[in-house]
Image (tube, rainbow, N blue to C red):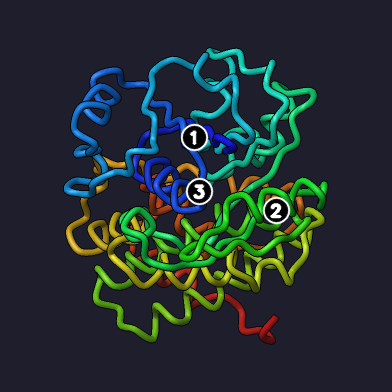
Amino acid sequence: MSRIGVIGAGAFGTALACAMTRAGRGVVLWGRDRDQVDQIAKTGLNQKYLPGQALPKEIHPTNDLDDLRDISALLMVIPAQKLRQFLTDHDLSHLTCPIALCAKGVESGTGLLQSQIVTDFFSDAPVAAISGPGFAAEISAGKPTALSVACEDQSIGRWLQGALSSEVLRLYLTEDLKGVQLGGALKNVYAIACGIAVGSDLGESARAALMTRGFAEMSRLASSIGAKTETLSGLSGLGDLALSCTSTQSRNFAFGEKLGRSGAFGSGKTVEGIATARATTELAETQGVDMPVANVVADVLERNLTIKQALAALMSRPLKTEV
């Protein structure tokens, strides 16, 4: 039986570990917190991130990266802003198995996608990305969803598709590695925008407008960096956007909703859209792409604009055709 390695014992990493056992795979789940790993091993629960959810016995929790040596594929579930430092601190260059990137974000300061980061650390391992509409609590509980798996080497992509799919998790294959990553990253920015709109009581029409114009911005930027616009219309783009902009289960939406309702910026959870907002606008500027919604989200998050000023800035833009 093939074994799958998962780096990152947070909510989504643990949920993917659960999903892989349903695909008939043994799973090695690595976590940086030794106490948390010991708790998972002793109780079969990840109470910090998935309270009350019993984990399959096929999951082997570990704090030792040497346990990942004999695996067929590695799912990397490290927050985008911490990926480079993690790979700098932990030498995994010996791995030659496929590495699937499962977190969502654009690196702050560089505008790089995660696949562009890992190429500095791996010379032989094929790189893939998995993204789409899937909340950790639902995936871990075995509720059905479908995700995109992207790999430029389609033979490896087909192997990953078959190895990771199950009766409740369906993977769709694409070679568009850039598009799948960009869709997953950018939807977080617009989820914050929609949360702000709902929290500020701007109405459901405003949310729908932000989702639609946000999708247009996502598609323009994707096209500018060589991704396929049709990828953005799929699970990793429109599918994930629809989920994240309409549910308080989305950390990014919930953060925006709290900000709009109370003006509170604090969050005890990883909210990838915060760093991705400015990273996105900087990338868009280098590409000559207009992204007004992403721009005002970044300005609000950096406290350069109030929510009222951001709304005025969007609504007073010159009238134009819909593209």
Residue 285 appears at what percent x and percent y? 69, 50
Pick whichever, 320 or 280, lies toward us: 280
Residue beneath the point at 39% across and 29% down = 60
**Would you name the residue on which mark 2 appears?**
150
Give the label, 3 or 1, closer to the camera.
3
Q: What residue would you read off at disc 3?
A: 24
Q: Circle 1 sits on which residue? A: 6
Residue pictured at 69% horizontal, 86% vertical:
321
Q: CA distance from mark 2 to mark 1?
A: 17 Å
- Residues 193 and 90: in front is 90
Q: Residue 167: percent from the left, percent from the top? A: 49, 65
To which quarter of the image does residue 290 belong?
Answer: bottom right
Q: Secondary structure at mark 3?
A: loop
Which residue is at a point 28% across and 59% down the rendered structure image?
254
Say few, some or many: other residues with alpha carbon within 10 Å of mark 3 (under 14 / 14 to 19 / 20 or more): some
Mark 1 or mark 2, which is nearer the start of the sequence? 1
Which of the two labelled residues, at mark 3 and mark 1, occupies the earlier sequence position?
A: 1
Q: Single out the mark in the foreground, 2 or 3.
A: 3
Task: Report, in whole angstroms, how far the alpha carbon at label 2 lies from the one at label 3.
Answer: 21 Å
Q: Nearer the viewer, residue 104 or 52?
A: 52
Residue displayed at 29% across by 17% down: 34
Name the one closer to the observer, 135 or 199.
135
Amino acid type for the residue under numbered disc 1? Val
